[in-house]
Image: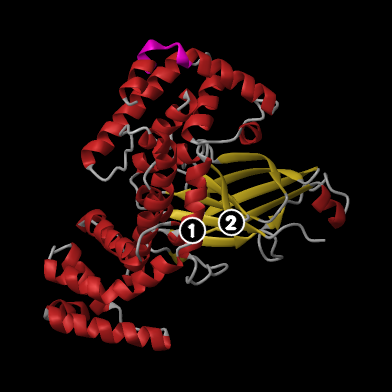
Amino acid sequence: MSQNAVVTSYSLDNLAHECQKETERFYKSGRSDDRFCFELFRRAIVDRLQQAWELVFSQYTPLVTGWVTRHPAFHQSAEEREYFVNRAFERMWHAMSPEKFSRMANLKALISYLKLCVHAAVIEHVERRTNKAEWSETDMENDVNTYTSGDTASSAVESAMTATTIWELITQVAKDDSDLVLARCSFVYDMKPAEVVDHYPELFTDVKQVYRQKENLLARLNRHSGLQAILSGHA
Amino acid sequence: MSIDQQLQSHLFRFDCPDPLSLGEYHFGLLDAVSRRSVQGHLSLCPLCRREVAQLAGFLTQTADPLPQGEARQSLLERIKVFVVDILAPSSGDLLPNAAFRDSDEQMFDQTQFRVHRAGQYLVSLSLKNQGNGQQTIVGDIANVNDPADGFTDWAYHFWQEGMLKQVSPLDETGTFILESTNTDPFELILTGPEIEIHLQHRGHET
């Protein structure tokens, strides 16, 4: 019987026990037999065994908690570590399909993917939401509910559709490629005029030109009735 | 709220790939269509390039450094990773036709031109110093086993100071040009369907 066949015949409890032993051995000596932990992940992800996933969760929570704590953006969030630990495992559960699992060469690859899920959970919360929320604060103060936290799927879809529609209108108003580049740099990437000049010296010679052109563009956008209808519908 | 602020509130990163997708791109997990889409986006979006750099930094916090020289398997099956130090004496061959330089000293003032081997691929790289701390990098990759091999599925990723500065697909013939980069140390990563070639330049010798 092959070594892998032996591992696949282990009960879940034995597998979890051996995985724990090998993990401790790795921390002490840098060496381990990864088959047990790999098999535990396999049963969780490929066989979709809930109990196996719970064992993966309890086995790797300490490691994931450490990663969360050490993520550079964690301390910018107002959330507890446990929030991101849970989000990271959730992401892995949803994103790691059996097909994707088949492309993981070894346990190290799986652990790296789990670390990616930590990064995604923290960044999504801190950087992707925070900036959007900043712009909506004024409306919140005015008792207007434009805050799109993205917590619900329907609000996320609505936000995406509104953004796409607004962008299409901007492409109609833009005179040329430099207007489109300027719109993207200003509204989508929140770049300062000096950064725009830095990134696109072939289109913009100095910040004065950026300011002038942006003023011009905003004036045309302000006069676009379709755009105004959308923006006022969200105001 | 001004119209500027309203537009920013709706449009900020509206068409950026989510962090997990950027991470899967970094790991080489995306299919060809998605990979090209993300590559195209990265060539335009400084925020996503920064995010990929943040991810790379976070992943390497406790990771082993890439070994020099030998090919090794990446985290995924099948993808081979080659790491080449393009200034190491044993790395790469200076082309015999070096008429543009009069001496070794002048080589670093003008143009360095070497050919490097990474498995079945030959990568030629020319670094032309333009003065004022700027240089132009011109490169070309060829498959010695299949000279007719096209490179439309390939891209370059240019890293400096821990930042992903440029991403762009290679042209069909495998040629790429990076203009007006500064002369600081860099890592140029060429990614193909099942291969990564890391060309590391530690800066000009003094």
Question: Would residue A170 be seen by someone viewing this image from the given angle?
Answer: yes
Residue at coordinates 13% horizontally, 62% vertically from top-left?
Answer: A48
Q: Amino acid at mark 1?
A: Ala
**Residue picked out by circle 1:** B56
Residue A225 % position (x, y)? 38, 11
Q: Secondary structure at mark 1?
A: helix
Q: Is residue B109 left or right of residue B3?
A: right
- Residue for point 48% across, 72% down: B62
On what subunit does the disc labeled 1 rest? Answer: B
Q: Position of residue B120 (x, y in %)?
A: 50, 55
Decide which of tag 2 and tag 1 comes sooner along the chain.
Answer: 1
Disc sitting over residue B162 in the figure: 2
- Look at the magenta stretch and give its main secondary structure: helix
> Which of these two is toward me, B18 or A98?
B18
Q: Nearer the viewer, residue B35 or A148?
A: A148
Image quarter of the N terminus of chain B: top left
Q: Looking at the image, is A197 positioned above or below residue B53?
A: above
Q: Are marks 2 and 1 in contact (CB under 8 Å)?
A: yes
* Res. A1 in view: no
Q: Which residues are magenta?
A: A221-227
Going 27% across and 87% down the picture, which residue do you hit?
Answer: A21
Mark 2 and mark 1: Cα distance apart in space? 9 Å
Residue positioned most to the right: B102
Which image quarter holds the C terminus of chain B?
Answer: bottom right
